[in-house]
Every structure is written in C-alpha cells, then in structure tokens.
Image: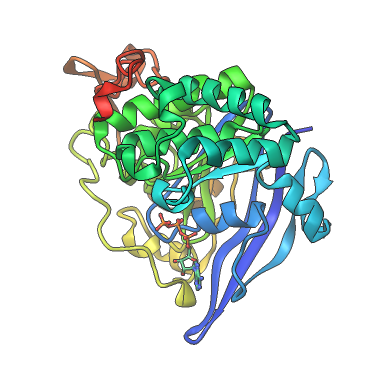
C-alpha cells in the first residue's frame, strides 16, 4: 500500500464567474520515502491538490468527489480533530513564503520547540534540544545562539531553512513543499533543495514537491506528475520524463530549462496561457496551444494511457493524456529531445546517463558549501 493514494479527486470553486474546476479526476500515489514532483504552470491546480490533502480547501471550494487515503485511512471522512492530528504531525507543509509561516513576535527556536512540545509531548529541555539539533541539521550556523533570534534577524534563506526545520520537527511521513524556494536566489535555492533532499532521506520522509520548474524537479524527485488546467497530463519517473517526454505540454515545459531542448522543432516557449478554468477548451484542454493539435483534439478529451499500448494506465503507471497514443491523430508528435550535459556540448538522450540528482542542471549546487550557513547572508 502506498503512503498516499489519491483517486479521481475533483475540486470545484464556486465563484461569481461560475464554477471553477480547479482539479479534475486526479489520481496519483506517493510511496513511503519517495520524492514526488508536481509540476505545471500557474493555475494548473497544484496548490489546490496540496490543500485538499490537508483538507484545507477554502470555503468557496469543495472537494466534489474522489478519495484520499493516507496510510490506508480515508482522509475525507475523518473527523476534523483527527485531521488536525494528521496535519503537522504526519503530513507537514512548507509554503513558498517563509515569512508567513514564522511568527514575528516569537523567537525562531521557541516556535519550533512549541510545535515539538505540542505534537510530540516533549518537556521544555527535550524540545529545546531537539530544536537545536534540527536547526543544525538544516544548516543554521551556531544553532544554540540563533535559537533566541527573532525571524527578522534571519536572512531569507535562513528563514526558509527554519521553516523546513519546523516542518520536520515532528518527523512527518509526508512533507508537502509548495514552491519552497521560489522566493530565493538560485544558489541558495540549490543548497536548500539539496538539504531538503538529504534530510528527507535521513528522516525517511516522503516529499511532495510542487513547482513550475522542471529543473527543481530534476534535482530532487524520483517521479513526476505534470498537471495542466486541473488535470494530470503525464506521469513518469524523472528519467522517463527528461529523456522521453510523451506529452507536448511536457516538451514545452522542458524548453524552459537550460539543459533540455530539441533541435529544429524546439518549442521555444509554449505560446498562449493556461485557459480560464470557468470555460476550459473542449476536447483536450491543451489543444489551443499545442503545435500538433488536429481537429480530433478539439472534440475528444484524451484519457491517461500507457503511451506504449494506448491502454488505460493505473494511478502509479507511466502515462500521458494525448490522442497520439490512442490512434486518434493523423499525424505524429514530431519533436526531438536533446539533453545537454553540465559542460555545455549537446549530447543526445542515448549518449548520456540520467542525472536526476541534479548533476546535469548546474544551478551552482555544492552540497556542503553552506555547512556554516554564511552563504545566505
Ligand atoms: N480560492 C479560490 N477561489 C476561486 N478559484 C480558485 C481559488 N483557489 C484556486 N482557484 C482556482 O483554481 C485554479 C488552480 O489554482 P492553484 O493555486 O492550485 O494553481 P497552481 O497550479 O498551484 O498555481 P500557482 O503555481 O500559481 O500556485 C486557479 O487558476 C483558480 O482558477
């Protein structure tokens, strides 16, 4: 049994403009200790999916249907107090903006210690000790001394580290990180992602990493879900996605990261924008932006299928939602993916081994360069 099982999740928002289907028929699995990426442009439904897992969808929104099981237990039918126990304790969440997660009137150490006392029932001394160790683990220099600092005395990168420490403080089984490094500069981002990656392994915590950046996914994740307009359009391992993307939208997203591109037929950027979800295009919702779209794409909504067989795929299987794989297109998806190595010079997909741990995406990562934390200052 997977740690998290999501089946056919549909979430609507009831707005003045009409009903917005933010997430539709979404299914995926996250295993224990796995690093799972959710990628897509703004408005794809990534955050709404995450909020649904914590049952934090706002009042105007409603989980219409579907199932969410965490360790086999149905999260959607749990009592509010049982869900509160799960939140923070077993599923923790890191948001993009560290400042909103840290309370300015308490010291950083006290905030983390309070979470530990509350959730793990630790006494004062033990909570303090665990906090200092966590601050050290996330790379805060002189953690004993920094324990008594207020959030504003931390740099942006250190604040985000503190938030990660807080999220890990109760040893959650699943950590949902929603654009955890978007507000930071690229070097600090790489260090924090690396730290997150190593800590998740150490604490045996699964990560659901939400981002619009495939480069970030390459650095951290094992498997990826690509979302467009509230739906899953591709599911694959990181290697499969990078070397053999199957959905035109994924190919388009890839042209935005430096090491991947294709030759003549490169989709420089994906023209157009995510549709207004009140009026999603008919058929395949990506068709107005897709360079391979045919008439059939305006009529028929593609299902997630195994691209090799065209058969419906299970929630943890490689799949893509494109009519090209069900024999409904006259033409072919005519693109070529080229993977560039770290030292420039283009290599073909076949000639270079995958480096999903980020080796190929040179974002300035140096795993230990921040051990004394000075780089953030
Ligand atoms: N509170 C809300 N009220 C109405 N509609 C909402 C609300 N929250 C989200 N939505 C709708 O759901 C869609 C998906 O939002 P979501 O925040 O999940 O996207 P996202 O992929 O996380 O994008 P971003 O990267 O910008 O956070 C939005 O485009 C919007 O139409």
Q: Is residue 290 above or below residue 279?
A: above
* Residue 127 relative to residue 234: left or right: right
> Along the line of sight, which residue is nearer the eye, 207 or 351?
207
* Residue 237 relative to residue 77: left or right: left
Q: What residue lies at 39% left-to-right and 39% top-to-bottom?
A: 159
Q: Is residue 259 above or below residue 166?
A: above
Q: What residue lies at 39% left-to-right and 20% top-to-bottom?
A: 142
Q: In x, y percent, where is residue 272?
A: 27, 63
Q: In x, y percent, where is residue 51?
A: 59, 56
Q: Quadrant of the N terminus?
A: top right
Quarter assignment of residue 140: top left
Q: What residue lies at 59% left-to-right and 69% top-to-bottom?
A: 58
Q: Is residue 292 above or below residue 205?
A: below
Q: What residue lies at 36% left-to-right and 15% top-to-bottom?
A: 371
Quarter assignment of residue 364: top left
Q: Residue furthest bottom?
A: 16
Q: In x, y percent, where is residue 64?
A: 70, 69
Q: In x, y percent, where is residue 273?
A: 31, 63
Residue 300 in sight in this render = yes
Quarter assignment of residue 239: top left
Q: Quadrant of the C terminus?
A: top left
> Along the line of sight, which residue is nearer the eye, 189 or 37?
189
* Residue 30 relative to residue 216: left or right: right
């Amino acid at each position: 049994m997977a740690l998290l099982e999501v089946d056919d999740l549909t979430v609507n928002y009831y707005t003045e403009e009409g009903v917005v289907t933010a997430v539709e028929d979404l299914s995926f699995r996250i295993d224990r200790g796995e690093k799972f990426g959710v990628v897509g442009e703004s408005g794809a439904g990534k955050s709404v999916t995450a909020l649904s897992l914590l049952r934090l969808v706002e009042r105007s929104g409603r989980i219409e249907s579907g199932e969410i099981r965490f360790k086999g237990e149905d999260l959607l039918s749990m009592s509010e107090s049982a869900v509160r126990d799960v939140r923070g304790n077993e599923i923790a969440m890191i948001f993009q903006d560290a400042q909103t997660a840290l309370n300015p009137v308490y010291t950083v150490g006290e905030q983390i210690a309070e979470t530990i006392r509350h959730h793990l029932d630790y006494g004062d001394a033990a909570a303090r000790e665990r906090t200092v160790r966590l601050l050290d683990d996330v790379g805060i220099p002189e953690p004993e001394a920094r324990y008594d600092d207020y959030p504003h005395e931390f740099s942006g990168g250190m604040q985000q580290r503190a938030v990660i420490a807080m999220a890990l403080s109760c040893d959650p089984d699943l950590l949902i990180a929603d654009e955890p490094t978007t507000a930071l500069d690229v070097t600090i981002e790489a260090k924090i992602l690396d730290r997150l990656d190593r800590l998740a392994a150490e604490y045996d915590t699964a990560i659901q990493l939400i981002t619009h950046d495939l480069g970030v996914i390459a650095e951290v994740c094992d498997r990826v879900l690509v979302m467009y307009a509230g739906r899953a359009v591709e599911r694959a391992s990181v290697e499969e996605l990078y070397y053999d993307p199957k959905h035109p939208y994924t190919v388009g997203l890839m042209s935005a990261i430096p090491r991947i591109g294709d030759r003549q037929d490169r989709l420089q950027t994906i023209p157009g924008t995510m549709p207004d979800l009140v009026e999603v295009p008919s058929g395949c919702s990506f068709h107005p932006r897709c360079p391979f779209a045919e008439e059939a794409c305006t009529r028929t909504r593609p299902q997630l299928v195994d691209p090799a067989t065209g058969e419906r795929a299970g929630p943890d299987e490689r799949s893509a939602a494109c009519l090209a794989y069900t024999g409904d297109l006259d033409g072919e998806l005519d693109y070529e993916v080229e993977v560039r190595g770290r030292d420039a010079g283009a290599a073909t997909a076949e000639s270079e081994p995958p480096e999903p741990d980020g080796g190929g995406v040179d974002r300035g990562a140096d795993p230990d360069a921040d051990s004394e934390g000075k780089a953030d200052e």
